[in-house]
Structures are given as C-alpha cells and as structure tokens.
Amino acid sequence: MMDELSLLQRIVVWILPVIFAITVHEVAHGWVAKRYGDNTASLLGRLTLNPIKHMDLVGTLILPGILLLTGTGFIFGWAKPVPVDARNFKNPRHDMAIVALAGPVANLLMALGWALLARVGVTVGIESISMPLIYMGIAGISINLALALLNLLPIPPLDGSRILTGILPNRLAWQYNQLERYGFIILLVLLYTKVLNVILEYPMYVAQNLFMSIAGL
C-alpha cells in the first residue's frame, strides 16, 4: 500500500511511528529497571517520552531515513541505550533479563495500539480521515514488530542476549557474553548476507498477519 505514496507522504506517515517505537522501547527498559531498584535512567532524565533525549543520529534519523528513501520495505533503527546498572538489582541476571524483555514487550503493545488505530480508520468510512489512520497504523505495526523481533534475537548486546543470559548457568552465561565485543560485526554480516532477512521473514509474516487482522486489513 505504501508504494502509492509520494516521498513526502511516506515521511509523514512513518516519522511518528518510528520515533515512538524507538523512544518507548528505551523508556520501557528504564521504567522496569527503576521498578527493580535501579534509578540510573531516572536520575539522568531518560525516563521521558521526549524523543530528543533518546535520539541517536545514526540509529534514529540516518538509517531509518536511508531505508525509507531506498524503499527496502524493512525499516528499523535504534535510540541511545537507556543506562542500566545491574549492580543495583537484588538478583542481577534475572532482573536484567526482565528489564531486557520490557523493550520488545513495549513494541508489541505499541503494535497493538497502532493496529487498533488502523481499525478505527477502517470503520470511519471518510477517506480523508481513514486513509491517514490506516497508513500510519500499518507503519506503526511494521516498525514495532521489526524492532521487537530483531531485539529478541540472542545476539549480544540485543535484548534477546540479556534474556538468554538470565536463563543460562553462570559459567555458560559468562562465556556467552564474551561474544558482545563481536555483536555489532555479527549483525552487520547477517544483514549484508541477507541471512537476517531469512531469519526474520517467517516470524514477521506471521506477526504481521495477526496484527493486520486485528486492524481489519
């Protein structure tokens, strides 16, 4: 559906879903960390929905912009990570796993919210109102599912690696976390070789079908 939009229309449709998806993802980490006893993000003023506080030049603006302009059909990005100090947790590995899970869960909840917004657009019946809601809803579903599924991959330092660390035995978890220094390189290789597309294609297809059905599309 997005192919029929002009470049300016695509930017208008995608900008809010992308900013909220990335920002709320990070705030969710900080909010849950605070619930478990770590006030680091709060003390640094990062528990805010003000996107300026979370923006990363490359991850929030440049990369999503390039993906949008090139029409890859797959848009994702990242914000400045919310600082979390696991030393403030009573059970560091377990609590950090829950903090990590909070980001993808926040994205899934936002995908649901965007699906419901698109559903409103479907039922309105007035094209000038319904089409913007539907387009923005589709964008919101897509970016949030992409972020949730990508972050659930068990590649350090993605959220999935923190979750897996909370499950593994201590020694194995320590050895596994040594991969973090190579994590970004691994991601780049998977992206360049399109293995990442293969890994995410089916889960993304299933998830999109589910949320699009909720949207009535």
Image (cartoon, rainbow, N blue to C red):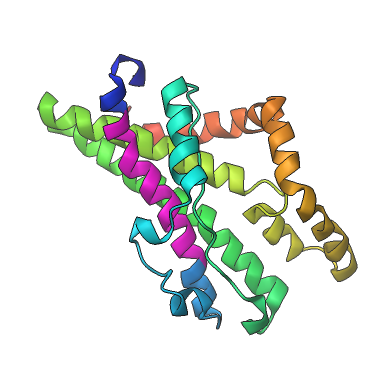
For the magenta stretch, what is the residue range?
Answer: 11-29
**Which image quadrant: the N terminus?**
top left
Q: Is residue 183 above or below residue 67?
A: below
Answer left or right for 213 relative to 105: left
Q: Residue at x 33, y 61 (%)?
A: 50
Answer left or right for 81 relative to 191: left
* Residue situated furthest top in the rendering: 4
**Quadrant in the picture for residue 191:** top right
Return the x and y of residue 46 as percentages of the image width and height. 43, 69
Return the x and y of residue 207 as percentages of the image width and height. 51, 36
Name the foreground residue: 75 vs 65: 65
Name the foreground residue: 40 vs 216: 40
Q: Residue at x 63, y 55 (%)?
A: 159
> Is residue 17 located in the magenta-colored stretch of the structure?
yes
Say whether residue 63 is visible: yes
Q: Residue at x 62, y 83 (%)?
A: 88
